[in-house]
Amino acid sequence: MMGDIGPEGQKSISSKKVVLIGCGALGTNIANLLVRAGVGELLLVDRDFVEIDNLHRQVLFSERDIGESKSETAAAILRSINSEVSIKSLIKDMMSSNIAEMVKGYDLIMDGTDNIPARMVINDYAVKEDVPWVYGGVLGTGGMVMNITGEGPCLRCLLPELPEQGDIPTCETMGVLNTVPAITAAVQVTEALKILMGKDHMKGLLQFDIWKNEFNLHEFRKDPKCECCGKREFVYLNEDNEEVVTQLCDGSIQIVPSGTSEADLKLIAGKLKGVENMKVNPFRLEFEVEGKKVTIFKDRRVIIKGAGDKGIARSIYSKFLGL
Ligand SMILES: [Zn+2]
């Protein structure tokens, strides 16, 4: 019945495939709206598991889901919402070495990530392969949305260099009001529907603060000197994934070893000594050591909570995992 969509628009939406990177606050809101809008296919990609302090803003999860995979839990709920949508899920950390295999064949990429390096990988891939993507960011009481479709600037036109870690506030230092991801995702999905229907969509960066009731659409031009869309040098995509150590939004340190082999978690569990509260299942191994909580995933990724800095995390990693 919506004049701007109509039966033809709905048909077009239902024939399209969308991939969503990140299934947290933005991602669950985005997935909910896209599935109810009846996209043809939705692939959910997320590396994390549900925690209790996610529940105020991550709308598809409940208390009984704590400890479960975000992408798989969300996929199950979404299938019960609209069985006509083909819903797929991956428990994976999207990075330069695997984005192509995840995203290939999809018509649109939705950003539900929580960090700038991940968005730069998406931006490089999307510009290189000419796939549209919808950027979304949230922090405190503010949000931002931008369409990157090749016509206008890309994310690197706005942000030529990565900010130093610690220079920008994070959701850990500032928190997120739960209405912010909801409104940000609603704007992202509205733009997604326009893009999927091939209609005119928002140009520029929409920035808002819903506490102060400020909404601004900033216009940006393509930077002809932009390394990504101007010079077509895709540095984030070409980065080799030796071993990547990053500080996550909640202060945890994540270590991602190179290669694609999988870990035998039960074997590792059997060898650990001097650790407490060990839990193991086929997907992950958890234990506590020296007051830090260590989680190892099947793809050999390790998250260390409470390590404080990368050096301490690195030393726990080598000490207990011999890697
Ligand atoms: Zn650019």
Image (cartoon, rainbow, N blue to C red):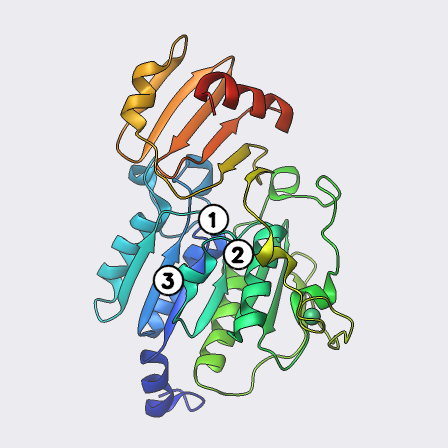
Instruction: Give the distance between the C-alpha atoms of the residues marked 3 and 1, in whole angstroms.
Output: 13 Å
Residue 168 vs residue 100: left or right? right
* Disc 3 residue type (three-letter): Asn
Residue at point 73% right, 65% down?
158
202 up-or-down from 256: above or below: below
- State if disc 1 and disc 2 touch (CB < 8 Å): yes
Q: Where does label 3 land, which residue? A: 32
User: Callout 1 environment at 10 Å: few (<14), some (14 to 19), or many (20+)?
Assistant: many
64 up-or-down from 211: above or below: above
Q: Point out the tag, 3 or 1, that comes first from the N-terminus.
A: 3
Residue 66 shows which numbered tag?
none
Residue 181 vs residue 262: left or right? right
Q: Where does label 1 land, which residue? A: 57
Q: Position of residue 246 (x, y in %)?
A: 59, 38
User: Mark 1: is the Cβ under 8 angstroms from ligand 1?
Assistant: no
Residue 174 vs residue 241: left or right? right
Q: Position of residue 207 (x, y in %)?
A: 68, 65
Residue 181 shows which numbered tag?
2
Closer to us: 314 or 45: 314
User: Callout 2 environment at 10 Å: few (<14), some (14 to 19), or many (20+)?
Assistant: many
* Quadrant where the image shows the N terminus: bottom left
Closer to us: 97 or 296: 97
292 up-or-down from 212: above or below: above
Q: Point out the tag, 2 or 1, that comes first from the N-terminus.
A: 1
Instruction: Give the distance between the C-alpha atoms of the residues marked 2 and 1, in whole angstroms.
Output: 7 Å
* Disc 2 residue type (three-letter): Pro
- State if disc 2 and disc 3 touch (CB < 8 Å): no
Residue at point 29% right, 59% down?
88
